Amino acid sequence: MIKYSFVVPAYNEQENISLLYEKVRQLINKFNDTYELIFINDGSKDQTLKKLKELAVKDKNVKYIDLSRNFGHQSALSAGLQYATGQAVISMDCDLQDPPEVIEEMIQKWESGYKIVYARRKNFRKDNLLKKAGSKIYYKFLGRFSSIDIPRNVGDFRLVDKTVLREINKMPEHSRYLRGMVAWTGFKHAFVDYYRPDRVEGESGYTFVKLAGLGMDGVFNFSSIPLKIGFYLGLISIISGFGLLTYQIFDFVINDAYYHLYKWLVVVMFIFFGFMFMLMWIIGEYIGKIYDDVRNRPVYIINETENFEQQK
Ligand code: UDP
Ligand code: MG
């Protein structure tokens, strides 16, 4: 039985593969436990696959999954997680921005009973201003509107127990926002804080566009606020329409004011538009429900049971 699985997506990481391998080995030597190091080659255009092949021949603890093309970080990670068989599964980046030293502390937390251990960045990413500002605003927004608590400043560097992994692997949804999915399971979690260094070799595969895509998945998969926009617009439109209509009627009846036909039409249109927005919201809610069903997340997740005759 394997105790630790390390799952590492790699996209154009030829320089980093062996560096990471050495670091993980050093770490595992301290624990003297069984482990597997799973790389996912996410359609790299450089020598990543060749490096992985060489390593896998040398050391049977190294395994790799070679994807047919570039599917993106979250999909690559999902593939690796499907293959991980360890008691504790650690997902990390290939570029040594997720320092293996932090893993020791994560393992300690896991051993003391936490099923999810997030590594949390203390410094902020030394990226360009756009990424930085975007990320700040994004987490504010997500924290406010999301239906579950998605921890801030955590990426995909984390340890999960195999019970958590089993739930994640059961979720067949296509657009995968793994940090949200992990948080959604709701198991007991802890944080380990760390300073995130710069990338050692190569370039970030996350362009602003890819990052924005990931962000959108976070919002659309974990919050129903976008659906409710129609409701609020409709409400504003109907209330102001009725307000204006009432005003016009009073003005017309009491003050004998004259209103051109188009002014009556405008207020009536306000009201009609309001109802249209409302209808769109109702349709949105149905689509939301269909989306929930299609995603096929479990209705509940059990942590443990006691005294039952039969284990389900
Ligand atoms: N990655 C991947 N597919 C991609 C982009 C990135 O598998 O399309 C991997 C990459 O090799 C690294 C991790 O995902 O192990 C994080 O990517 P990166 O370092 O580029 O992101 P950043 O640290 O800039 O957020
Ligand atoms: Mg990186």
Image: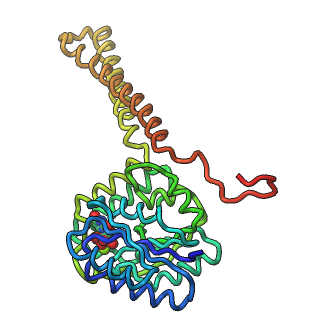
Give coordinates of residue 83: x percent, y percent.
47, 65
Q: Give the camera-side residue of 244 and 92.
A: 92
Q: Residue furthest front?
A: 57
Going by the image, does 169 lie left or right of 21?
right
Question: Which quadrant contains ligand 1?
Answer: bottom left
Q: Give the camera-side residue of 71 and 200.
A: 71
Above or below for 116 versus 311: below
Above or below for 252 versus 212: above
The image quadrant that residue 198 belongs to is bottom left
Give coordinates of residue 8: x percent, y percent.
39, 72
Going by the image, does 297 lie left or right of 269?
right
Give coordinates of residue 50: x percent, y percent.
27, 77
The image quadrant that residue 42 belongs to is bottom left
The image quadrant that residue 155 belongs to is bottom left
Marks counted in the figure total 0
- Which residue is depicted at the point 52% across and 55% down? 184
Q: Quadrant of the N terminus?
A: bottom right
Q: Give the camera-side residue of 92 and 7.
A: 7
Above or below for 272 versus 194: above
The answer to whether one can see residue 133 in this image is no
- Which residue is depicted at the point 48% across and 77% down? 36
The answer to whether one can see residue 124 in this image is yes
